[in-house]
Image (spheres, helix red, strand yellow):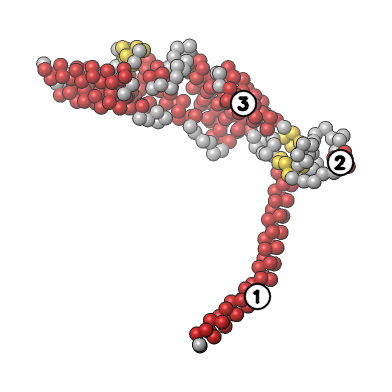
Amino acid sequence: MPLLKSASDVFDQANDYLMRGDFASALNKYNDAVRKFQKVGDVNGATQAYAYAAVMSLAQNPSNPNAYRGAAQALHALGDSPVKLGLRESTGNALAHEAEILASVMEWTSLQPASTAQYQQKAQALRQVATAIRSDIGSNVLVLPELFRQGSITGESQALALAAQSEEALAESMIATDPKAAAEHYQTARLWWSQAGNGVQADAAAAHVAQYGKSAKCWFCGREVAGENIHFVPMPSDLTDLVKAADKDSPLPSFDPQTGNVYACKGCHGAVHHLADALATQRMNELDAKIQPQIQDLKNQIQSIKNRVNML
């Protein structure tokens, strides 16, 4: 009996650390409680303490999807038993489901796609997670982020952010083939970010809208392209008023009137760039061929001086 009381006392002490926000100490005490409950054969007590310990471990792994899945598994073992975390009370199953959703959020938002297919996969996955969190959490506050002082985030606001990121991933999958469509998806993302109250991300999305939606005519070949710094790039140049006037009737600009930079499609830009590299290399080789004999002559003179010094 004293041992059982000791286990309960340790569990209560862990709860006190939790309330004070000392999650590392709470984790240690919950783990102590697990061992003490197991020692006296209290399976329910050990299961409860283990679930709380799994939640506390999230403070040390705030971005690890596997940590959230581990916590979800431990919480599911509590079923619909009440779980009190800080000032909020929920159930084991409800918190387990939240942890599973957050694991998916972290897994897909941290993914850095390396191909069009991966961007499309990320977009679809984020859309599905957004739907799940909107329907299952709704206007309720997410318990775990609030517990770890990440703010009071409702399911709806999180869903809006995920929907925005889904649109951005879809946009990135289209940049190579249809920058105008990519700009439209970024525009949708901007609206979602605005509704989520994230002005910084909304402005960033708007910048992509301007970049990918911009069209120009190549100064060199006349090709009409969209997607600044993707399919066409500005290049420094010296334009006279007469030269600029020759382009005044074109429906698309071939130069920037403010900077005087001309627009080059990636094909022409690449050709100019590679030609410049080739000419630079050729010139360097020519200079090297001229200077090497002079360097060798200086080396010979230095060696001759050394030989005379040694003979003295």
The residue at the far left in this view is: 1
> Considering the numbered disc 2 on the image, is that residue within a helix, a strand or a loop?
helix
| Foreground disc of the pair 2, 3 | 2
Q: Is residue 88 above or below residue 235?
A: above
User: What residue would you read off at disc 3?
Assistant: 203
Q: Decide which of tag 2 and tag 3 comes sooner along the chain.
A: 3
Comes first in the chain, label 1 or label 2: 2
Residue found at x 68% / y 56%: 277
**Is 280 in front, or is 99?**
280
Q: Residues within 10 Å of mark 1 (few under 14, many from 20)?
A: few
- How many marks the image carries: the answer is 3
Label 1 – label 2 distance at C-alpha? 48 Å
Percent of width and height locating residue 159: 51, 19
Q: CA distance from mark 2 to mark 3?
A: 35 Å
- The residue type indicated by label 2 comes to Asp
Residue tagged 2: 241
Q: Are marks 1 and 3 in contact (CB under 8 Å)?
A: no
Q: CA distance from mark 1 to mark 3?
A: 59 Å
> Element type at marker 1?
helix
- The quadrant of the rendering that contains the N terminus is top left
Q: In the image, which disc is placed on residue 293?
A: 1
* Image side of residue 160 versus residue 69, left or right: right
Q: Are marks 1 and 2 in contact (CB under 8 Å)?
A: no
Q: Is residue 298 left or right of residue 64?
A: right
Which element carries disc 3, helix, strand or loop?
A: helix
Q: Give the answer, above or below, for where 76 lies relative to 237.
A: above
Find residue 201 and report its horizontal and vertical position in percent.
Answer: 57, 26
Could you say which is closer to the camera, residue 297 or residue 43? 297
Q: Earlier in the sequence, mark 1 or mark 3?
A: 3
* Residue occupying image coordinates x 88% and y 42%: 242
Residue 258 in view: yes
- Most extreme residue toward the front is 312
